Structure formats: C-alpha cells, structure tokens
Amino acid sequence: MTINPGHSRNPGSDGPGSAELDAALRQFAQRPQILVALDFDGVLAPFVRDPDAAAPMPSSVAAVHRLSRAGVHIAYISGRPLADLRSRAEAPAGAVFVGSHGAEVAMNGDDGADADAVELSTDEADRLAALNSRLASALSRTPNTWLESKPAGVVVHTRGADEDEAARALEQAREAAADFPTVKVTKGHHVLEFALRHSNKGEGLSRVRSSLRPEAVLFAGDDTTDEDAFAILRPEDVGIKVGPGETAARYRVRDPQQVSDVLEQLAELVESRDG
Ligand SMILES: O=P(O)(O)OC[C@H]1O[C@H](O[C@H]2O[C@H](CO)[C@@H](O)[C@H](O)[C@H]2O)[C@H](O)[C@@H](O)[C@@H]1O
C-alpha cells in the first residue's frame, strides 16, 4: 500500500463545490456505467461510541437511492461483518456488500443468497477462540475498552477511554496477541483489529469491479484500511478521503455531511444526464 501525503487537497480547500472535485464529479457522471463504492463508519455514518448505534445519514441514504434508481451500481465496502453491514446500510435493492475488510463479499445484495461469508476451519475457529480469550483477560482491568467479535477476528475498541487508558489497552492487546504470529493487526479510528484472514478492501473492490465491469469507480473512505482501495483506483476513477490524514486519494472532504453533499451533487448530475 502506497500513501502519498501530498496527493490530495486539504479539507476546506477541496470540499464539495471546489473546482477540482466538481470537475471530477461532472466527468465521472457522464459515463453510462459507473460504480459508487462507499465505506460505512466515518463516511456514511458519523462515528458514535457504540457501533450498534451507528446509522447512515438520512441525506446520504436518500442520495444513494437516487443514484441507484438512475442506474448507478452501488457497493458498500466495510470492516464490519457482512451481515451487520447489510442490516444497517439501508441500501437500495441490488447493492453489493463487501464486509470484514474484503474477506466477505455478497454480489447479490438483495437476499444474500450467494454471499461469500467467512467459514472458519476448525483450526481457525480454535485459534480465534484462544485469541478472544487472551485479549479478554489482558483487557479485563483496563477501563473503557471492550472487544468486538467478528467472523474472522476480534477488535479492541478504545473510543471513550482517555489517551493513557487507550495506549495501555493497545499495548496490552498487542502483547497478548504476540503468540498468534499469523494474525494481521490493523489500527483504525480508536480500534485495533486482529484478523485471521488477510484480505483487504482493495481486493474486495477489485472483485466488485471485475464482476460489474463499470467504466469508472468512485470510492470514499476515511480510515487506514481504505488506503488499500484508494491504491487500486485508476486515472478515470474518483477517490475521496474523508477527514484528515495521509492518503493516496486524489480528493478530500471533511466529514460524513460533506460526503452526503457529494452524493447529492452526483445524483443531480446523473439524473440530468439521463434527462
Ligand atoms: O470500514 P468501516 O465501515 O469504516 O468500518 C470500520 C470499523 O467501524 C466500526 O468502528 C468504528 O465505528 C464505531 C461506531 O461509530 C466507533 O465506535 C469506532 O471507534 C470506529 O472505529 C466497527 O465497530 C468496526 O468493526 C469496523 O471495522
């Protein structure tokens, strides 16, 4: 994964309405077959302390449905487990879902009939159970931290912990997981994820692109794991980093509200193209 810190414009100078992003969206919208692929937390849904309380912004949901009705392919690409992502995305019919950072893919988003969900081998299931219990015991005395179980991994959450508590929790978690050398460790926004499967969002987005064959892709993401998806974008694609931080994306917006503004602008452009 290559991150080019100087590549994308700063929020504020390049939010919705900026000349560069406007021009990119106009050009993108002219193509008949396009894919809009969206990360969930921090992009469609503002961050909250409890992941079960996260919900997409109503204005983004409405804009995504408009895009879908106008014939745009829609994909959700998230670190969340597939079933969780599907249940809270409020997605239009026919949307595609990529969960667990690319480890789970459902090309037919309607009913999940052909969902490529994670099935662990007995050995993997045993190792995941051991990892879970090791982390639970390591963090049992660290306040304001908790574990989220995933189909092929476990996440240490520290949102709500103060800086010292969070740093201590992450150090304890890394130490506890040191006996599991094949586990992939990924840092995200107030989370540290330990995964048995090593797929990434770039692989997930590539699978969706190969299946749907759009002429161009727009992808918006906010976290380090989204950089794998930005890295596989092509010159005709539109990559939008949400929030601060180094990125390979060409454009940047500030927050989920500005993502919503971009989606509404794109829906207008696509609808007027069709009209
Ligand atoms: O790929 P994403 O859709 O961005 O999912 C990444 C992780 O999102 C969730 O955690 C994040 O959102 C939580 C709710 O707002 C927040 O409390 C947490 O601090 C964030 O890191 C989710 O819980 C993870 O499983 C996802 O991997």
Image: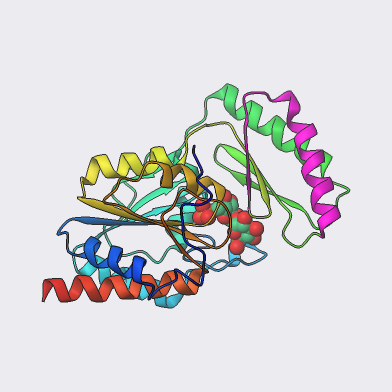
Q: Is residue 36 left or right of residue 248?
A: left
Location of residue 107 with respect to 110 vertically, above or below = above
Q: Going 52% across and 48% down the picture, which residue do you hit?
A: 79
- For the C terminus, the image quarter is bottom left
Farthest residue, direction left: 275
Q: Where does residue 42 sit, x and y in percent of width and height?
A: 54, 62
Asked whether residue 163 is drawn in magenta, I would say yes
Q: Quadrant of ligand 1?
A: bottom right
User: Looking at this view, is 34 or 100 the one in front?
Assistant: 34
Give the image quarter of residue 29.
Answer: bottom left
Q: Which residue is nearer to you in this view: 120 or 178?
A: 178
Residue located farthest toward the front when viewing the structure as drawn: 6
Colouring of the image: rainbow
Residue 178 horizontal/vertical position (percent): 75, 27
Residue nearer the viewer, 3 or 102: 3
Q: Is residue 135 left or right of residue 100?
A: right
Residue at 69% x, 25% y: name it.
180
Q: Please name whichever residue, 111 or 264, is drawn nearer the observer in this view of the structure.
A: 264
- Check the image and report above or below for 121 versus 38: above
Q: Is residue 83 left or right of residue 125?
A: left
Q: How many marks?
A: 0
Where does residue 113 sit, x and y in percent of width and height? 31, 46
Is residue 84 part of the magenta span, yes or no? no
Q: Position of residue 59 (x, y in %)?
A: 41, 77
Dominant SS in magenta: helix
From this view, report whether residue 210 is shown above or below residue 89: above
Residue occupying image coordinates x 51% and y 52%:
6
- Magenta residues span 162-188
User: Which residue is located at x 79 percent, y 59 percent?
Assistant: 161
